[in-house]
Image: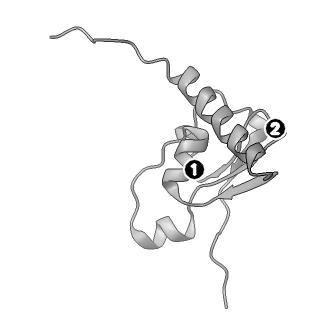
Amino acid sequence: MTSPVCTLDLGRMRRERFEKLRRAMGAADIDTLVLCNQGNVSYATGARMPAADPMRAAWWRAVAVVRRDDTSPHLFTEFPEGSPGGIPNDHLHPAVEVEAAE
């Protein structure tokens, strides 16, 4: 077995990504972001979601709310076990239905 070239500090990388996002929000004078795309949610929170069929993914998707004045994002997810350890419990919420009935 080969030795790893380096050890990744995922917690540090997640914190730096979040701070970079908050700085960009400040530069654009944005107070709050609501992220619904799985890639954007993962970028902002570090959360992992299992693959799902399109209907389930559209109906019960993870949502992140990022406030510029908050030190951690809010994560709304059906899979809280996929959230990283750095998100406080009061920032972890049940999934929301993103799509609305006509």
The foreground one among 37 and 22 is: 22
Question: Which quadrant holds the C terminus?
Answer: bottom right
Q: What numbered label is drawn on residue 70?
A: 2
Tell me: residue 24, above or below residue 30. Answer: above
Residue 50, horizontal then vertical, whole percent: 42, 50
Q: Secondary structure at mark 2?
A: loop
- Residue type of the residue flagged with mark 1: Val
What's the residue type where badge 2 is placed? Asp
Q: Who's the residue at 57% across and 64% down the image?
A: 60
Percent x, y for residue 78?
A: 58, 53
Query: Which label is found at residue 2?
Result: none
**In what element is the residue under mark 1?**
helix
What crowding class fits label 2: few (fewer than 14 Cα within 10 Å), some (14-19), or many (20 or more)?
A: few
Residue found at the very far bottom of the displayed protein: 102
Work out whether 94 lies above or below 90: below
Q: Are marks 1 and 2 in contact (CB under 8 Å)?
A: no
The quadrant of the image that shows the N terminus is top left
Residue labelled with disc 1? 41
Q: Which quadrant of the structure image shows residue 68?
A: top right
- N-terminal of the pair, mark 1 or mark 2, is 1
Q: Quadrant of residue 23?
A: top right
